[in-house]
Image: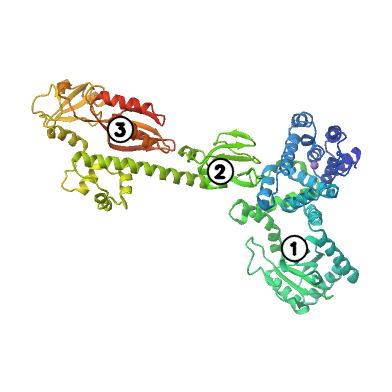
Amino acid sequence: MMRQYELVERVKSYDPAADEEALNRAYVFSMKAHGNQQRASGDSYFSHPVEVAGILSEKKLDSASIVTGLLHDTVEDTVATMADIEGQFGGEVARLVDGVTKLSQLDLVSDRSMQAENFRKLVLAMSQDIRVLIVKLADRLHNMRTLNFIRSADKRRRIARETMDIYVPLAERIGIRDWKEELEDLAFAELNPDARSSILSRLDFLRKRGGDIVGRVLEELRGTFERNGVKADVSGREKRPPSIWRKMQRNNVGFEQLSDIMAFRVLVDTEEECYRALGVIHSNYRVVPGRFKDYISLPKPNGYRSLHTSVMGPFKERIEVQIRTWEMHDVAELGVAAHWQHKQGIPTDKRTEGMQYRWLRELLEILDHAGGAEEFLEHTKLEMYADQVFCFTPKGELQALPAGSTAVDFAYAVHTDIGNTCVGAKVNGRIVPLRTELRNGDQVEIITSKAQTPSPTWESFVVTGKARACIRRFVRGQQRREYTQLGREIVEKVFREEGYEFTLKAIEGVVKNFHCRTPDDLFAEVGEGNSTGTEVLHAVFPGSKKRGWRERMALRPRRKGKKRPVAIKGLTPGMAVHIAGCCHPIPGDRIVGIQTTGKGVTIHTIDCETLESFTDMPERWVDLAWDVEDEEARLHNARIKVIVANEPGSLGVLSTVVGREGGNISNLKIMDRSADFFEMLIDIEVGDIKQLTDIIAALRATSVINSVERAHV
Ligand code: MN
């Protein structure tokens, strides 16, 4: 185990300005916190954070990262708290330790290999500061180096699988190639011990037979290019066991056939030289059939361009050769970044690609050179997945959602049926409102009930398109059913009142006139207020007079043998009378008449706002009162404005309440429809103000109805 002064000296050797005092304090703090805890190896637990700090110092990281390495397990595994860390080491270190702790808590989640890509994103999203990820990788590297001490084979395999799926690609993406390769080798050794030892002994055998075969092939290839006048930079190496294994699996080759264990890269200046270099290779060495790939004329989807071929090399061993220009080589490295961007859905734009590439480049350079590292790392935030949030189902499956997603979005992401029947949600075991915004790493359990249907109010807070579309589709269908029922009632009533027989067959015959396909479509139109029952009647029986409610009101007394259209005291006989369309007065309302030349008298309620425009013309005012004795079995149209909750069933409740109080809805118009409420105007036929007041009171007592008032429009 590295001693305190060794660690400090190592850090100071590349960063003379390092916070020596903080390093010393962190060393002691961690040692005391871990006390005599032990690792599986029997070593003191404290050796682990010290090794992690040592690994980090090899990458010449800033002192905050090294301190974080020393402290990274104290909050998770000892009595030390975040507050202790913040108090003793400040906000920056506290933030970093907190980040690593959160990532470590993810390790506890069950099998994740199926969703590796999402987990990698989750780790990135939660890292925020690149140093968090680097410390986590160093932690994982040391744990992998000591994996063999863990007794449970299942646990070893799980950790190795996770390393292969999550941490190897992450190390590759941030460009720490040697960590990537070591992690991969260690995981491979655990997951495929037999394959690995076979490959290693084969490599050994080949090496013994051929000596430094890579070096010799390299020399030979360089000479061949020179003789043929191609200026090329050639490099080569032995492939590592995991990549040899992948190749064996991909190409389904048996072990005895395994001979292409060397890979060479040829870099030239121009595209034309790529093909000339290829010609040199193919004319000097025997080509292995079926292995040539031209990714220059047919680039890979991620933009990768290169020529790949395999030949029998100068020493009769298969070698793999990749030929590309320096520029293509840059893009090949950029492939990592391009992939990154692709996953974020950022359009492939050369300029942003370049920027992303530079970001990685700079990171690598800074990891190599101490100067300015602190400042750079300080400002390097991992914002790659800041626009997404990653949550788990109770089974540990991961859902990637847009930032701001709520429990309802999550429910719909899992399954449409879950969304449609969700009644509640538990986040990390606690019941929360459905509108609760989810955070990275939340475990979300959706509570469902078959009796539940989507609420239109959900639409105001969901953020995913899927949830929105499902809610709309459902609510739309629900509303249509209500409109259909309401419309049918209206049409039937108009037919009944006007003395015509209502049959569906008759309605079917006229649906086309209304641009509808079925009677239900037409009823929905009427229910929604786009057509009226009278229009339907008129279409079915063109002989019937098409009348509005005012005319019918005026007509009805005549049918019943009354002398005057409206029973009102104070009118000059023979005077024409109109009921004002603004205030819809009904018996019981205090009323006043306004005389209009050539038009007779218009009746308003005494509080109607229209009257204000007549205040200067007292000569036109007529004192009137309802003739109550004369009022028998006569219906009057009242208009009310109702605000109803926009939820399933509310329109049905509305029509039921009105009907129960003996009112008839003769017309209905929706003025405004928001996510939460409908505002509508309803004409109701009532006998008098008492009946209307009863209806209004009954409506006000109904929970789905927000407000009711007489309309003055
Ligand atoms: Mn650890």
Does residue 568 sit above or below 41 in this rendering?
above
Rendering coords of residue 520 (x, y %): 33, 48
Rendering coords of residue 515 (x, y %): 29, 52
Question: Which residue: 80% across, 65% down?
Answer: 235
Q: Which of pointers 3 and 2 lies earlier in the amino acid sequence? A: 2
| Disc 2 residue lies near ligand 1 with CB under 8 A | no
Q: Is residue 368 left or right of residue 408?
A: right
Residue type pointed to by label 1: Arg
Q: Is residue 583 left or right of residue 439?
A: left
Does residue 124 sit above or below 212 in this rendering?
above
Q: Which of pointers 3 and 1 lies earlier in the amino acid sequence? A: 1
Determine crowd level at label 1: few under 14, some 14-19, many 20+ residues with C-alpha closer than 10 A. few
Q: Are marks 1 and 2 in contact (CB under 8 Å)?
A: no
Pointer 2 residue? 411
Pointer 3 residue? 659
Pointer 1 residue? 246
| Disc 1 residue lies near ligand 1 with CB under 8 A | no
Rendering coords of residue 75 (x, y %): 77, 34
